[in-house]
Amino acid sequence: MCNACVIDSVKRSMLSRRSLFTGAAATTAAVVAAGLTSARPALAAGSGKVADLTHAWDSDFPTFDGNPGILYEEAVNIDKSGYQLYKLTIFEHSGTHIDAPLHFSKDGMSVDEIPAGNLVCPLCVIDLKAKAKYDANAMVEPADIEAWVSANGEIPAGACVAFNSGWADKVATPEFRNTPDGNFAFPGFSKAATDLLATMNVACIGTDTLSLDPGNSADFAVHNSWLPSGRYGIEGLAGLDAVPARGATIFVGAPKHKKGTGGPARVLAVY
């Protein structure tokens, strides 16, 4: 076979393979695009801004039981070893964190079992500041949800519905957790409100306080109904002033340790 024939043959082979790979790549891209288009929920069509809804936390960060939620122990010293790292002791429900269904049920879904599709949600923010200004144990009630819908439209299925009570601004003060006489006091959801949200197929609820229930709750009615139903909650959100009432997409960076009842999470909103 002549050299020119060999060269032509190689060229034809390369062009054929290039077409094959180009076609395969195009097919893959189409599949991915179709998956993103059909994903629930769709990403917010916003300006591309990102809000961090997560508190940075350490052993001084307030917790429900008053004990440090995270402890540091030096494991490797940089002066001795050239690098450094810490051993951390973390309590699942500290800082900005998730309550998984398993938190309030013996056989509920653990944090690692929450479907990934439920961790990317349209974000709906209810402004509770006016009520919380006069009542430290203010609650989101069905009327607040109905008012939000009247102003903003229907709550999308798979949404995260969070309230902004302004409590995140108190995080460095005793008032984030207690009244001056030492009683729990912070806003939360009413069971009537979360029962209504359940009928709307909401995926999760979020608070900027220590709990899904208000501080003066004696029965944890929301924890005992919302979580065992297979839904999850986020407590201790920050930065909700930065996001609109409707139109943001929340990304919940849930931990994935097996059999976890919840855990600290990095929560971001794109809008």
Image (cartoon, rainbow, N blue to C red):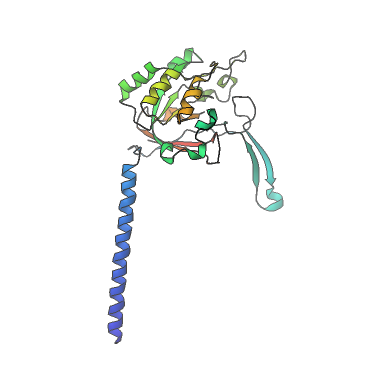
* Residue sitting farthest toward the front: 107
Image quarter hosting the N terminus: bottom left
* Residue sitting farthest toward the right: 80
35 lies above or below 164: below
Of residue 270 and residue 79, the one placed in the foreground of this image is: 270
Q: Is 249 positioned to the left or the right of 93 in the image?
A: left
Of residue 60 and residue 216, the one placed in the foreground of this image is: 216
22 lies above or below 129: below
Residue 152 image-quadrant placement: top left
| Residue 103 shows in this picture | yes
| Residue 99 shows in this picture | no
75 lies above or below 170: below
Of residue 181 and residue 218, the one placed in the foreground of this image is: 218
Image quarter hosting the C terminus: top left
Q: Position of residue 60 (x, y in %)?
A: 63, 29
Q: Is 35 positioned to the left or the right of 256 in the image?
A: left
Q: Is 85 positioned to the left or the right of 132 in the image?
A: right
Q: Position of residue 237 (x, y in %)?
A: 49, 29
Task: Give the residue drawn at x 30%, y 80%.
Answer: 7
Q: Is 105 positioned to the left or the right of 50 in the image?
A: right
Q: Position of residue 174 (x, y in %)?
A: 60, 20
Residue 8 image-quadrant placement: bottom left
Q: Position of residue 37 (x, y in %)?
A: 31, 43
Number of on-image labels:
0
